[in-house]
Image (cartoon, helix red, strand yellow):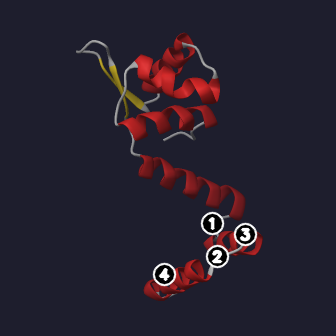
């Protein structure tokens, strides 16, 4: 899978949230955030279909657009790419950077400890 652009994440987000939508529904869902016209949304959906990111049900009318990949698969690929490219694969460095930069509640700290104990790290 290729790296998703911010705009592709935005379009896929609508498709994941809706489970599939018509062109009009996708356009309305994106209007406030992007200001995109119907033609712009159609262009994105068509290009994303060519990349294997979107499936189009061409049997019915209006056509139904769905994400061809799960949110979880895309998130996993993005995490892996980020970890490799930014932290050279060092997951501990990534976690340490997040923990240093953002406050962690006592509940989150306890959950992290449990997770690490379960992983036998």
- Find the distance from the CA under tag 1 to the CA under tag 2: 9 Å
Q: Residues within 10 Å of mark 3 (few under 14, many from 20)?
A: few
- Find the distance from the CA under tag 1 to the CA under tag 3: 21 Å
- Find the distance from the CA under tag 4 to the CA under tag 2: 13 Å
Tell me which numbered mark, 4 or 1, is placed earlier along the sequence: 1
User: What x and y, as percent, mark residue 77?
Assistant: 51, 51
Identify the residue shown where x is 56% and y is 81%. Answer: 107
Q: Residue furthest right?
A: 101
Disc number for residue 89:
1
- In this rendering, the label closer to the viewer, 4 or 1: 4
Query: Mark 2 highlights which residue?
Result: 92
Query: Mark 3 highlights which residue?
Result: 102
- Left or right: 4 with respect to 66? right
- In this rendering, the label closer to the viewer, 2 or 3: 3
Tell me which numbered mark, 1 or 3, is placed earlier along the sequence: 1
Tell me which numbered mark, 4 or 2, is placed earlier along the sequence: 2
């Amino acid at each position: 899978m290729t790296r998703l652009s911010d705009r592709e994440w935005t379009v896929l987000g609508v498709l994941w949230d809706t489970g599939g939508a018509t062109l009009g529904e996708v356009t309305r869902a994106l209007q406030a955030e992007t200001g995109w016209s119907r033609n712009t949304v159609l262009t994105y959906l068509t290009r994303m279909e060519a990349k294997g990111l979107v499936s189009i049900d061409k049997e019915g009318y209006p056509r139904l657009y769905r994400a061809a990949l799960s949110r979880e698969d895309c998130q996993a690929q993005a995490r892996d790419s980020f970890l490799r490219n930014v932290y050279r694969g060092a997951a501990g460095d990534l976690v340490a950077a997040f923990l240093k930069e953002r406050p962690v509640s006592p509940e989150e700290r306890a959950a992290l400890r449990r997770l690490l104990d379960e992983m036998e790290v």
